[in-house]
Image (cartoon, rainbow, N blue to C red):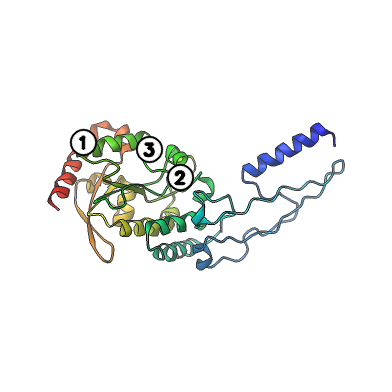
Amino acid sequence: MTPDRTKAARELLAFYLEAGVDGVLVEQPINHFGPEASAATLAAGAAPRTAAVTPEPAPSAPRARLPEPRASAPAATSAMPAPGPSLTLSPDTAVMAAREAAKSAASLDELRAIMQGFRGCALRVTATQLVFADGNPKARIMFVGEAPGRDEDIEGLPFVGRSGKLLDRMIGAIGLDRTKAYIANVIPWRPPGNRTPTPQETQICLPFIQRQIELVDPDVLVTLGNPSTQTLLGTREGIMRTRGRWFDYDTGTRVIRVLPTFHPAYLLRSPAYKRLAWQDLLAIAKVLRQS
């Protein structure tokens, strides 16, 4: 192979590696799934490894091999784990693994580390990084949205795009900012193309946000938009019927008052509803003053 062709081949292989390719196609079928891992293995962030497959060489070219993928760094010591294979599990198995993992977290730092290493949700493979939370973990009020968008995926913080700037203005109008509030999402990884998370993805991630709420233990919980409201309150009613009404959220040790309101992204599309959102904010401010 000439030097130019060798250089081009190396650059192509490097591109494949950065794109997440860790295997090649051959004519014979290969079982890439194998036996399901246990919930304990998932909670620890371990993943099975598939034997590398080397393609048959082309008649006129020497044998080529894809570079080995880099090993993932331990979840507790890395802000973003290195790419690695995700486990293919049944939804029930993945939900059970998430419950066990979330329940074992004694602090928000432990919960973040566990979520960094959790491989039971396929969204972590396509997302840039985990979007855990922002704000003051000792705040009296917690806001929960649905899932990160492109800007959040890049910065690793929830509500930093256009809707986040509107949320900052909304809470600023009642004397709050991110030093006095805690902000998170039901889904901590950005769905590809900002698509709607599937019911399975939501159920897998639900134990993590539930544990996050327990650890923050706010006086007031504000669900932003229909998906987070329906998921956390277990209701099928739409946001038009639930917004502005107070609900109870039972953590098992305490009952927290919950007020659903519109998601800032919806208000950007439908500014006529800002008037109703303002009424919800006034109700929140009143409860915070009285409690």
Q: Residue 168 at what x, y percent from top left?
A: 29, 37
Amino acid type shown at disc 1 = Ala
* Residue at numbered disc 3: 160
Name the residue located 24 percent from the left edge and 39 percent from the top edge.
171
Amino acid type shown at disc 3 = Val
Q: Residue 172 at what x, y percent from top left?
A: 24, 37
Q: Relative to 97, is 52 above or below? A: above
Q: Are marks 3 and 1 in contact (CB under 8 Å)?
A: no
Amino acid type shown at disc 2 = Arg
Q: Residue 123 at what x, y percent from top left?
A: 49, 50
N-terminal label among 2 and 1: 1
Name the residue located 66 percent from the left edge and 44 percent from the top edge.
17
Element class at badge 3: loop
Name the residue located 43 percent from the left edge and 55 percent from the top edge.
112
Mark 1 Cα-neighbour bin, 10 Å: few <14, some 14–19, many ≥20: some
* Residue at numbered disc 1: 173
Q: CA distance from mark 2 to mark 1?
A: 29 Å
- As drawn, is 87 to the left or to the right of 58? left
> Residue 190's mark?
2
Residue furthest to the front: 77
N-terminal label among 2 and 3: 3
Q: Are marks 2 and 3 in contact (CB under 8 Å)?
A: no
Q: Nearer the viewer, residue 122 or 216?
A: 216
Name the residue located 28 percent from the left edge and 66 percent from the top edge.
252
Q: CA distance from mark 3 to mark 1?
A: 18 Å
Q: Nearer the viewer, mark 2 or mark 1?
A: 1
Q: Relative to 162, is 34 above or below? A: below
Mark 3 Cα-neighbour bin, 10 Å: few <14, some 14–19, many ≥20: many
Element class at badge 1: loop
Q: CA distance from mark 2 to mark 3?
A: 13 Å
N-terminal label among 3 and 1: 3
